[in-house]
Structure formats: structure tokens, C-alpha cells
Amino acid sequence: MTETPAKPAAKKTAKKTATKIATKTTTAAKKTTAKKTAAAKPAGAKKTAVATKTAAKKAPAKAPAKKAAPARKPESRVAMVRRARRINRELAELYPYAHPELDFGNPFELLVATVLSAQTTDLRVNQTTPRLFAVCPTPEDMAAIPPEQLEELIRPTGFFRAKAKSLIGLSTALRDRFGGEVPGRLEDLVTLPGVGRKTANVVLGNAFGVPGITVDTHFGRLARRFGWTTAQDAEKVEADVAEIFPKSEWTMLSHRVVFHGRRVCHSRKPACGACPIAPLCPSYGEGETDPEKAKKLLKYELGGQPGQRLKPPSDYPGQPALPLVAS
């Protein structure tokens, strides 16, 4: 009877003991796991170290970093103008025979040939105009010709319908407003159908001796490559370049730059390695710099090929172009 109250105490003691054992077991298990983990670490570390060394041996050595090209110093306005004028002098020595590459015998023929030269080569125009001028030697003749006949005559130059419309329009204007004569003023020329500043400057500079800068695709491209302008608009390019050179140089400068653009400083692959003015050009390296490879890119007389005119000037050192072969 006196032992009955002791049972709950025994149960409590048993619970405490069980708890202690469980705790010890858990603690022991944790210690064992910790020991195993600690023991496993050095072996893994060794393997990792060995693997790293092996990978390092197999991996190719890194190429030494290339040194960045020294930044070009900003060019002052005065330095740019001096360099530009020196380029002009160098081009004058390279192309003493530079000339307009359209065949013409009078202002009207030059005006018509220049209009036809849009979106085609001067060579193709020169091969087309002999037959055209045999049929339409004057503005009066061209104004009276049926459009279909004129289109057929100028078909080889491309865009023949639009060009025929311009030629008939400008010929009619010359007949009705200027007495059949090509005017010698820019403000009059640009009123004619199909005639813009580029065409007007070509006619004024080469038929009338009035200085002008002809901004075609070649001139604009080289003016930007030479650092004379950053403009894309032809009139802005003309204005920028006009501020660099004296007026007396404008017409011949245009011929020299266009000559160089057609023969050496091409649009897609300029022949930098064969360019005599490479030391003066901030864009050197845009094209082929190997001298031998660059020589193969030269065109027309510099490349030993015929020029663009069927009747070139007497001082032209190359071969005349061949007439258009009838298909």
C-alpha cells in the first residue's frame, strides 16, 4: 500500500532516462557525422587541387592582351585645312590630266550627258550619246522628238522613261525661255527639269569656266574620309568644302577627287596600300593595306584598263573606252 505513490515517479525517471539516452545518441550521431565530414574534406580537397593543376597544364596559355592603339589627337581647324590643301596638291601631281569624264562638244551636249549620268556610269553615257546627238543635236530637235523614240535612244543608261521626260522638258525650256541656248548662271540652270546643283556645277565649271564644286557619290565619300566634312547632304558637303579651298580650285578639285574615288578610294574596298596620299588620310586602313593586293584593286588607267571616254583629252595616259556593242 505504501509503494503505490512511487509508480508515477518511476515513470518520470524512465522518461528522463530515455530522453537523456536519446539526446546522447543524437549527439553521438552528430559527432560521428561531423568526424566523417571532417575526414572526407582533406581527401576531396586534394582531389580538387590535383584536378585544378591538371586542367591548368592542359589549358592553352592565354594570348597576351593587345595594346590599344593610341587615340588620335583632335585636329585643329587650321591643321585640317593645311592637310586638305596638301591632299589637293598631291592629287594634282597624281592626276595632272584630270578632266570631266563625259564626252561633249558643247554646253547642250554636256548638260544632256550629265542628266543621263544619274544612276549609271559615265562610260555607259559616252557609249549612248553619239547615236542620241546624231538624231537630236539641238534643244529644238530634242524638244520635238516623240518620247518613245527618245526613250529607245537612251535606254542603255537606265531609268530611260524618267530621263526622257526630263530631257524633253529641259529642251523645251531652253527653246522657249532661253532662245535655244544653255544659260551660264546657276540660278537659271536649276530651273530646268532634271537639273540640280550638281548638274549645274558640272556645266558651269566645264562648259563656261565658272568655278563650282561637283558633289557626286565619289566626292561626298572622299570628303568625309578625308575629314573635310561629316555631312551627308550634298549641299552641306559643298558648303563645307567651299570654305576650305579657294574658289579658283573648285572645278579642278572636283575632277581630282572624283578621279581618285573611281580609281583608288573605292566605296567598298579602297586600295589603301596603293594610295599615294595614305599618310594624309585619317581613314587609312578602311581598305586593303597590303601593297601588292591593293595594286590589283586599281581601276582605269592606273589598273591598265580603258578609261570612260571614247574621246579622251590628248594628255590622257590611258586607253580610250570602246563603243557600245550592239546587241
Image: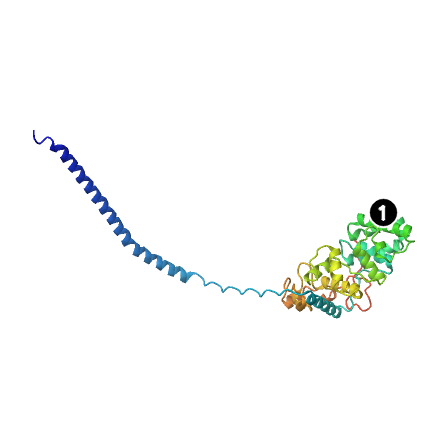
Q: Residues within 10 Å of mark 1 (few under 14, many from 20)?
A: some
Is residue 151 visible in this depiction of the protein?
A: no
> At 85% across and 47% down in the image, what residue appears?
147
Is residue 37 visible in this depiction of the protein?
A: yes
- Position of residue 178 measured from the top left corner of the image (x, y, whole percent): 90, 53
| Residue located beneath label 1 in the image | 147
Outermost top residue: 1
**In the image: residue 48, left or right of residue 68:** left
**In the image: residue 231, left or right of residue 155:** left
Viewer-proximal residue, 131 or 116? 116
Viewer-proximal residue, 167 or 30? 30
Q: Kindly identify the amino acid type of the residue bearing the numbered disc 1.
A: Pro
**In the image: residue 23, left or right of residue 7:** right
Q: Is residue 73 above or below residue 158?
A: below
> At 75% across and 59% down in the image, what residue appears?
239
Examine the image and state in which quarter residue 287 appears: bottom right
Viewer-proximal residue, 297 or 197? 197
**In the image: residue 217, left or right of residue 179:** left
Indicate the secondary structure of the residue bearing disc 1.
helix
Viewer-proximal residue, 261 or 159? 261
